[in-house]
Amino acid sequence: MAVRSLATRKTLTLGLNSTRLTQSRALQTFSLPDLPYDYGALEPAISGEIMQLHHQKHHQTYITNYNKALEQLHEAIQKGDSSTVVKLQSAIKFNGGGHINHSIFWNNLSPIREGGGEPPKGSLGWAIDTNFGSLETLIQKISAEGAAVQGSGWVWLGLDKELKKLVVETTANQDPLVTKGAHVVPLLGIDVWEHAYYLQYKNARPDYLKNIWKVINWNYASGVYEKESA
Amino acid sequence: MSKRALEVHWGVHHRGFVDDLNKQLGKSDILYGSTMDELVKATYNNGNPLPEFNNAAEVWNHDLFWESMQPGGGGMPKLGLLEQIEKDFGSFTNFREKFMETALSLFGSGWVWVVLKRREKRLAVVKSSNSINPIVWDDIPILNLDMWEHAYYLDYKNDKAKYVSTFMNHLVSWNAAMVRMACAEAFVNFGEPKIPIA
């Protein structure tokens, strides 16, 4: 009995300490990740001008606004201001989603001389054949669904960890793939917002989707697939 | 707005919508022969849009967009429209701020509108996503601004604020807006008419 009350007192003290720590814990903010290649390295599939604007302006803006929204959320939580907490959700989903999606996207691309465009081997290659028949069929499907997105959004190749199969999905605006299923993990995402291709392809989104396969980094997708299906 | 932007926006995007819509209408006995307003409302189908909606609405929206601008535009509206704006927004400056704020807070693709709200009997600045058009909410559009990236990307890259303020300062056609306002007033009862005493 005595032992137990000793333990309880200790836990209480620890509990108090950790509350103090929580309140003074700094909010983690985010910063723009570097690209693993030069802006011009994906040409001619995607122009250097687009890559630079896309990375330095668009992605950076999502990060800046995400950090701002997080700070406001942090304050609102501490004040117990529920209506502000709920009001901020759409800004967080949009800007946080933008940060998540673009971070994945930069890894999904790779210069040709570093393996961009090389078909997936190993377990992902096999899973693609099982789920879709062939890589060509999958590519057609992703391109078609990407072209059909109305307005702004993304097209994804994902792994549904619950159903243990590959899926092709689209999301609107900056909604991350997880909004399509709590168990769906993104392997490959292609940005079909106009800013991703307009300067080079104008409104010919299907041409952009046809050419981007030359710089798709299947190695990264394979890596994620292997890790998530273990 | 550069010549190049107009060539692509009007010549490729807008033209594309018109061509695609005509193709779809050619296959539809029910929709063929409707007016643009009827088409947009019918294909919107109360929120479950039919396949023709996107093309129909984008044709409608772009028609108004070109009408909402003029060379040497900008400045301020006059007479009744200015009075109404001052009444509904406090001042023209407030209205401009509201317009800018609404345009910049749109997530994704869409449009910004100045509409005459039928039930509230006042002007408002509203935003819509993708191709949605306020006539499906039964409001009367006075002018609009295309906030899809294709509308400004060639000229402004991602500087939306500069695009919107350039529109307000140099492009917006208050003449066209005043005409549309006069027509809209025929449908909304603002109260006792001011009958001039001879």
Image: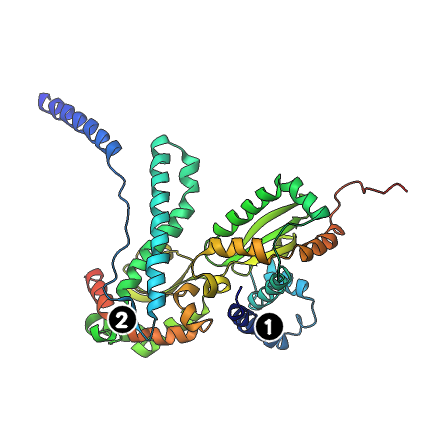
Pick the residue in front: B126 or A169: B126
Can you tell which quarter of the image residue A130 is in?
Answer: bottom left
Residue A115 quadrant:
bottom left
Q: Is residue B22 above or below residue B123?
A: below
**Taking A222 as reference, is A149 left or right?**
right
Residue at 48 percent across and 51 percent down: it is B104
Q: Chain of mark 1?
A: B
Relative height, residue B35 to residue A69 (above, below):
below
Describe residue B69's horizontal placement relative to residue A46 as left or right. right
- The residue beneath circle 1 is B18
Q: Secondary structure at mark 2?
A: helix
Instruction: Name the image quarter holding the N terminus of chain A.
Output: top left
* Rendered location of residue A49, percent (x, y): 35, 67
Question: Residue visible at 85% across and 42% down?
Answer: B195
Q: Position of residue A23 (x, y in %)?
A: 26, 32
Q: Which mark is residue A41?
A: 2
Q: In the rendered structure, which amino acid carries the disc numbered 2?
A: Ala
Mark 2 neighbour density, 10 Å: few (under 14) some (14–19) many (20 or more): some
Chain label for disc 2: A
Which element type, helix, strand or loop, lies under badge 1? helix
Residue at x-position 61% and y-position 54% = B74
Left or right of B131, for residue A84: left
Q: Position of residue A119 (x, y in %)?
A: 25, 76
Residue A186 visible in rendering? no
